[in-house]
Image (cartoon, grey):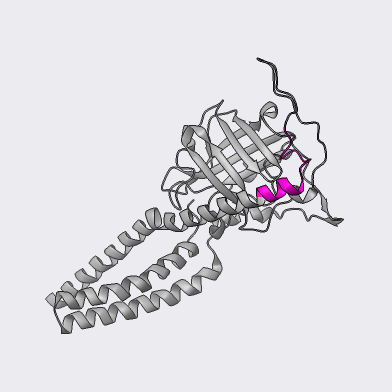
Amino acid sequence: MRRTIAAIGRALVAIGLLILLFVTYELWGTGIFTARAQTHLKHQFQQQLQKVQEEHPDDPVVTTPTTKPRKGSKPPRSTTTTIDPRLLVAPPEGQGEGVIQIPKIGVDWAFVEGVQLSDLAKGPGHYPGTPLPGQIGNAAIAGHRTTHGAPFYNVNELAPGDKIIIQTFAGKYTYVVYKRPFAVKPTDYYVVNNTRDAQLTLTSCNPRYSAAERIVIKAKLLRTASDKPHKPPTRINGRLIPPPKPEQLSTALKGQANSVAPSVLWAFIVAIVGGLWWWAFRRWRHPFTWLIGVVPFLVVLFPFYVYLERALPNGY
């Protein structure tokens, strides 16, 4: 009886440690991947932006005033009205789309197209089907608040008048928050409904460390400090751009089904390696045996956590 109780106790302790390690991976380990992705995305975006500026010197993205504005007057606005339509179309899912800066809370992140788990693991993501930042309509961007570097950790501190600056391949745009952050249910997709004017909506989890609600920040384009906004194109190279599917707004709340099988497989491998480690340590009770076993165990534990995190529902 004692042996049974002792075995159950050791098993519970082991499970508790595994859960604690997983929480540690969620809060800090995921940030390692995101930091590497951000370095790559920012470097890639700057290279592509420079290329766009060289290929399209007359577009608004590189238009500069020929005369200096008088003291106290507004800066002259570009008179350029044409732009390469390819710059107004979202890139493939997961690819870099621009850079978002929020000076008040120290945000300076590259953002990608898409709000799937794999997209938001790289940084903030643009909701597919909503206009791009700098276009007429309601551009929407989601971001993690506690994991993967927590880009939107302090969005609750934003207030009316705070600025959000976004650089895309089509131009640089400044938005101004016009209402205090508010919370909605995860299924309240109306917050990203389209608008007649150029707006920006940021979403993240609320409260922190929970996915019970979504915190929402609303901002409007400050035209005097932005490049000219454009209408979202309906065609590109003569081909009709398909309308967004309604379910696109809810996919960010679901786990990736293709990560379930790998997580189960790696859980099986972890169990085998952990069992062999326990057996070896029971046979040769020596600290060296324990050290030899911990290395392969952590090696197989890491990919298990990676796939498990992707398979779970998105907690932002």
Is residue 57 one of those drawn in magenta?
yes
249 on left or right of 254: right
User: Hey, which quadrant is residue 66 in on the image?
Assistant: top right
Examine the rendered structure and indicate whether residue 10 appears above or below residue 104: below
Residue 28 drawn at (x, y percent)? 38, 54
Name the image quarter holding residue 309: bottom left
232 versus 296 height, above or below: above
Residue 251 location in percent, x, y?
A: 60, 57
Provide residue 103's location: percent of width, then percent of height.
51, 33
Q: How many numbered dots are placed on residues in this image?
A: 0
Region in magenta: 49-64
Magenta-drawn stretch contains 264: no
Above or below, 277 relative to 222: below
Q: Which residue lies furthest to the right in this view?
A: 238
Residue 204 is at least partly visible in this image? yes
Quarter of the image holding residue 184?
top right
Seen in the image, is 242 located left or right of residue 173? right
Residue 169 vs residue 12: left or right?
Answer: right
Can residue 121 be seen here? The reply is no
Of the 4 image quadrants, the one containing the N terminus is bottom left
Q: Which residue sits furthest bottom?
A: 283
Identify whether 305 is placed above or below 63.
below
Give whichever of 270, 162 is nearer the camera.
Answer: 162
In the image, what residue occupies the spot 47% across and 47% down?
212
- Of the pair 165 and 208, the residue shown nearer to us: 165
